Structure formats: C-alpha cells, structure tokens
Image (tube, rainbow, N blue to C red):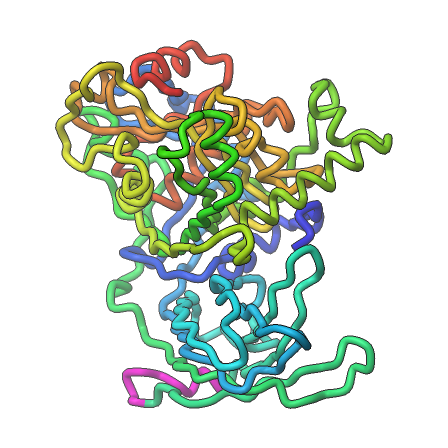
Amino acid sequence: VDYGTTNKNWNPSNLAHNFATKQSSGTYLPLERYRLNTMDNSAQNVDNKKSTGPVALSTSLSNQLKIGSTSTTFSFPSAILHVKILSGTNLYQTDAFHPIDPYVQVSLGSDSSRSITLLRGGSNCVFNWKVAFPINPDNVQQQHRDGLAITVWDQDLGSKDDEVGRATIPTAKFLKWEKSKSRAFEGKVKLEHKGRLTGRSKDGGSLDVEIYWETNSVFTEARDVSLENMFASPAFGSGGSAAVPIPIPLTYCVTNFNNLSGLAQTIIDRKKISEYTPFRTYRMRLWHVPFVFRGFTKGWNRQYKAAQQIYGTHLGSKTVRATLRMQNYVAYSNDYVNNRSSEVHELSAMESFRRMLRSYDGRDVSSSSSFVPLRGKVTSPRYTYVIMPDSHMHFSVTSTKIATDFLSKHALHAGAATEVVYSGEFFFDRFSRRAVKTGKAALVIDNNSGTFAPPKDKLESLKLLMYLNFGTKVPVFALDRDDPLLKELSDANGVE
C-alpha cells in the first residue's frame, strides 16, 4: 500500500457513487438510506462542555457537507454479498526453500479485505476468512464492472510480497448466486499465477470458497433522517429525544502481538521480565472516510523539530524513515519472527470496540453502567492513532515511558508516510463528573500529534466519522489539543 497516495481526484458531483462504493467489507444494520440536511446560520454550535440536551450539527460542518443543494439523499445497499475463503489447495510455491506464508485479499471495486497471514501455512492451508460487501443488485454491474477479485499473496519479510495466484469472478456470474433461490456457490476457484519476470501464466492452485448474496432483512422500508436528528441522542443528556437509528457498519479489527517490541517495552519501561507481555498494535478499517473528509489529507508538520528530523532530506532523516518503515512492518505484520499470533475482532457499534480493548486491558472500560473507581489511583490507558488515506486506522497504547512512547509514535503508525487524513490520541472517559452522573462512558478523541498537527477545524468531521462508524449510543468528545476540557477529562481519568 502506498500510504503517501492521497485522494486528489475527489469529485463532489460523484458523491453518491463514491459513497456507495467506497465501503470496506462489512454490512449495515438498521437503515437503508438517510438524508443529509444542511443547516442555516442559526444552527446551534456544538459545545462539548455542555451535555444537557440534543446535540445539533454545527454550521461549519453543515456547510462542509453542502453539495450544491440543501439536501442530498444517499441510497444504502439493499443486499449483502458474502464471501468465505475456506482453504487453499496446491497453492503455487513462490519460495524455493521454505513453506509460503499465505494470506488472501478479496476486493470488490475499491473495497477490499485482507486476511491474517498463515505463517508457514504452506501450499495446503485453511483460511476461514469471511467478507461481507454491501451491494445494490440493481446497479452493481455498473459500479463494479471488474467483478470480484480474489488474490493469494506470500508475505515476505523486508521485501515485496509475492503474488501466489489470482482469480476474478465476473459480476454477472456472482449475481446469479442468490441464497434465497438456493443458488449459493460452494466449490473450487482456480487461481492463475503469472511469473514475475516472464509474465507467463501457470497453475496457481485453487481455493475452496462459498459465495452468495442475500437481501438484508432489516431493509424493510426506505427512510430519511436528517443529521441533526441523528445526533439527538439520550447519551448527551436527559433532554435529548430518542436517537434515530443510523446504519452502523460491521467491520474487522486485527490485533497483532509483537514479541520483540514487548520484550523491549518490558526491559526498558517495567524493568521486570516477570511482567512481560507482547506489545499490541491494532489495524481497523473505518467506513466513510472519503465521504466525511472529502479527500482531505494533512502533511507532516514542517514547524516541528522532531518531524524535521524524520522527513528531512539529509542522510540521517532517510535512515530514520527506513527504520520507522521497518518498525511499522514489524508492528503491523504477523511475521513469525516478530509476532507469534494475531486476533481478528468483528466490531459493530462502540460497545464492541470497548469490549475488544477491555479484553486486553481491564482498566480500559467498564462493562456495567455504574462506574466505581479502581482501588488506589485511577488510571486509564491512552492510545495514539493515525487515520490513513486507505481508510485504515492504526493505533496502540501510549504513555510517557520511553519504550512505549517510541513504539506509539504517529510517524511509526504511519510507516513514515508524509501525509495522513488525521491523527491524535484517544481514551475513554469513565470517571469524570459527567460519566459518574449519567452512568455513560464517552470516547474522548483529539488532534494531539506534533508530527502532523491536524487542524482543529476538522474535529467535527472526526466526530461525525466516529458516529457513522460506531453509532450515537456512546457520546464522542472531539477536542482540540489545547482545549481545557481535554486536560480536565484526562486528569479525572488518570490518563497515563
């Protein structure tokens, strides 16, 4: 992936098409479509410090979303295309001296989903990787003329991954595989391998797959909802009206457990081998990034001395970037030298996101609605994150301790890319007066990144992105790095 590539061809006139096709693998939950209504200049501005009533969309974000008219309606997909890659048989052996490390990538247009790597899985392996693409059967042939692409790769450490084999299933063909008509496809898909030097086609082996599509049963009727009603959630106070359901995506988050980084973290920060744990990194696909940010990217901060040392033109900077790219590979791959295992979590709504983090660190989130401070000093983990132009969010726990701080640098998460969509830090508010009084945790996310210095005028876009991905049940506070409320919430939660 070329993380430095930005969406320079973003065209507002094609917004409906882009919004329908720029989705990651997943499915929508309750709503088929909604209307984005821009608000006039009298619209209430969001004040995160007050949570006594419904939250209206601010004028600045409303104007940002305005596309030549006062409202735009987008049709959400009415069906789901399910793809399950079961296993591989006689996959092409790209490595001469040891078993291949295969992973599978399934793509439909600009949407794609990559499985975890089967380390030393070899030519006969079991993937069991599921993908669910939202589609509109009536126009999917126009939107995805290239069909469904399935590619198997061999992961290589320190060099470009080798293509094991590829297959393309025409759109017209998979449209025949409707589950309700008992036409689901179960069988083998043959792969074609092309030599890197000769370009000659060879037998790439085969995959056992299941492919079918079905109408989403929750799409029973078309409904429109304005953004201001979407944010009118009881989570913001007793004065709020019932929240209108919005389509919440189902997506995957891959957690990698890095042994070498965990060892360094243990020795340098904890100084007790008995407290060793692998260092965890998370990679999650976010929906609607092009729609919300409309092609916006932020380059590195040329006024920040540390960023100058990374992105400068002298030899030392080039060495630093090479080191960061390698460390990014180590952190986000599951190569057997660096990571012994990976876990895949299905996420739908904020609760599943919180449960995933809590499964690794019990301090992170309480599963109950009542908040009782932990014995002694209250501490809450803090995470650094970057949102990349490919719509993936990379993040990990951070702290002021030396090793953890280095392993969670934004430039490292970005793989030394010169541009990101947005970056900062986040944590969950559990112990502020608001949280204790309402019994509701909140996501607190900011733009605290010296390397990229994201502008604060995009914070409302960041908040909208979080709501569209995780729903409105849990409040989201998108705060500027210099906002006094951020320090207040950090202190109340003992953020490390």
Seen in the picture, residue 470 relative to 95 is either above or below; the reply is: above
Asked if 356 appears above or below 114 in the picture, the reply is: above
List the single residue furthest toward the right. 314
Q: Quick one: quadrant of the C terminus?
A: top left
**Residue 108 visible somewhere in the drawing:** no
Residue displayed at 47% across by 39% down: 262
- 308 in the magenta segment: no
Outermost residue, front direction? 273
Viewed as shown, does residue 282 lie left or right of 406? left
Instruction: Give the quadrant of residue 412.
Output: top right
Q: Quadrant of residue 450?
A: top right
Q: Which of 125 and 472 is in front in this view?
A: 125
Q: Can residue 149 be seen in this view?
A: yes
Image quadrant for the N terminus? bottom right
In the depicted view, which residue is nearer to us: 55 or 487?
Answer: 487
The spot of residue 122 in percent (x, y) is 53, 76
* Residue 103, percent from left and from top: 53, 68
Q: In percent of the image, x 47 and y 62: which residue is there?
A: 116
> Residue 286, position in %: x, y?
47, 48
Q: In this view, does 298 lie above or below 359?
A: above
Determine which quarter of the picture holds residue 415.
top right
Q: Which residue occupies 28% across, 43% down?
A: 359
Q: Say which of 152 and 237 sits in front.
A: 152
Which residue range is magenta in the image? 173-182
